[in-house]
Image: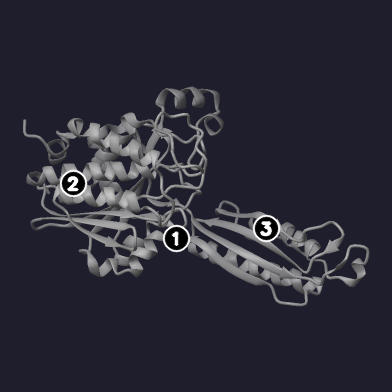
Amino acid sequence: MRMSSSETVLAGLESELGWLQEIYTRLHRHPELSFEEHETSKIVEEKLTAFGYSVTRIGGTGVVGVLANGVGPAVLARADMDALPVTEATGLSYASAVNGIMHACGHDLHVSALLGAAKLMADGRGAWSGTYITLFQPAEEVGAGSQAMIDDGLVTKVPRPDVAFAQHVMPIPAGTVATTIGPVLSAGDSLKITVYGKGAHGSMPHMSVDPVVLAASIVLRLQSIVSRETKPGDFAVVTVGALNAGATSNIIPDRATLLLNIRTYDAGIRAGVLAAVERIVKGECSAAGSPREPEFEYYDQFPLTSNDAAVTERVRTAFTARFGAEAVRTAERQTASEDFSRIPDAFDVPYTFWLLGGADPDAYRAAASKGTVARDIPANHSPSFAPVIDPTLSMGVQAHVVAALSYLSREG
């Protein structure tokens, strides 16, 4: 029986897993923060060049490898590279050797999996036709890496893809992938709000406009945005993560700062929530007699990740054919955020983003049977986050290859 394109390209996977695991443990042991991924980028460049890709640096530490292989569609696959300022507590033999920094979100696995797919796609060129574009992106954790690559001319420096893919390891059972149509990751907006009062001695509150009381009123009123201004059933989260004012007990300060984070799945709801935040803050400042207008500083803004229906169904079908229906799940919408979607949006092409299982299957089943998954399975950004290498890495490589070949296969 004739092998499919995926079977042909993936036939050599087992022989590649040794060096891929070495790359993964090396990256995990030597993590690099956002826009500091210098050694990671060097490794990626060396590997892609050896595989026969045309390699370009874009956006500082960003790397793009292009493999042109005849007439056909162009597929872009993306992996993010940066680590987090987190002290590792996994106890792994290959735990981070860099104090206060670890790959707590799995980007080391993303890089390794895409390098594996790049190698197999290069070796298996006889089974497909078109262009395979591998994009290794910096600074996802701060929501700035994809835009840095775009600002550095990404859309003019590489071929325009017809479709784009990305995956993210998550605390679901290893050996599974999960997809969904429409929103899969929320939009995220962080903002710093500064409100102003009038300072005075703590014994003379009548001489002040107290910004602490003002900020407290704002915090309470902000809770009404979701409970009273957002339609029941629609999703929105408004979190005040920090409130800072003053430095001593007997001095009323002249200002207070609040740090907010907002998550939404809908552009209209996002606009409404942000407008409500500004309206409430300005209203409370007016009511308190604040001597200056409040200031709003937006930062760490992440776009919505919303999967194209046709692309997602095509990839899901290919995943099911390769892995079996039991290994292909329907992804729950995540309240986490990503900046991947800026890349396909810049090219104006459709995309799909899937979740890759990384949790030990036995531990996950045991926790699920007790209803303690959220407590017992370390999630992304946890000091204890540690995807199991086998079969997560293999599945990550396969998922990239299968998704790409759902468009590039000579079988049509």
Residue 35 is drawn in which quadrant?
bottom left
Q: Nearer the viewer, residue 70 or 122?
A: 122
Of callouts 3 and 1, the N-terminal one: 3
**78 above or below 191?**
above
The crowding category of the residue bearing disc 1, from other C-alpha atoms within 10 Å (few below 14, some 14 to 19, many at least 20), is: many
Instruction: Give residue 120's mark.
Output: none
Q: Residue at x 41, y 27 (%)?
A: 360
Q: Position of residue 373 (x, y in %)?
A: 52, 30
Q: Label 2 sits on what residue type?
A: Leu
Q: Residue at coordinates 14% horizontally, 39% vertically from top-left?
A: 9
Q: Left of 67 or right of it: where is 310?
A: right
Quadrant in which the N terminus appears: top left
First reached walking from the N terminus: tag 1 or tag 2: 1
Instruction: Assign a secondary structure to mark 2.
Output: helix
Q: How far across and how far down the image is residue 371, in percent?
A: 55, 27
| Number of numbered discs visible in the structure rendering | 3
Q: Secondary structure at mark 3?
A: helix
Whole-angstrom CA distance, mark 1 to mark 2, is 27 Å
Q: Which residue is mark 3?
A: 228
Q: Relative to the observer, which residue lies in front, 233 or 27?
A: 27
Task: From the top left corner, tell me how far across and down residue 116 is, in percent.
Answer: 23, 41
Q: Is residue 289 above or below residue 143?
A: below
Using the image, tell me which numbered label, if any, was put on residue 405.
2
Q: Are marks 1 and 2 in contact (CB under 8 Å)?
A: no
Residue under label 1: 303
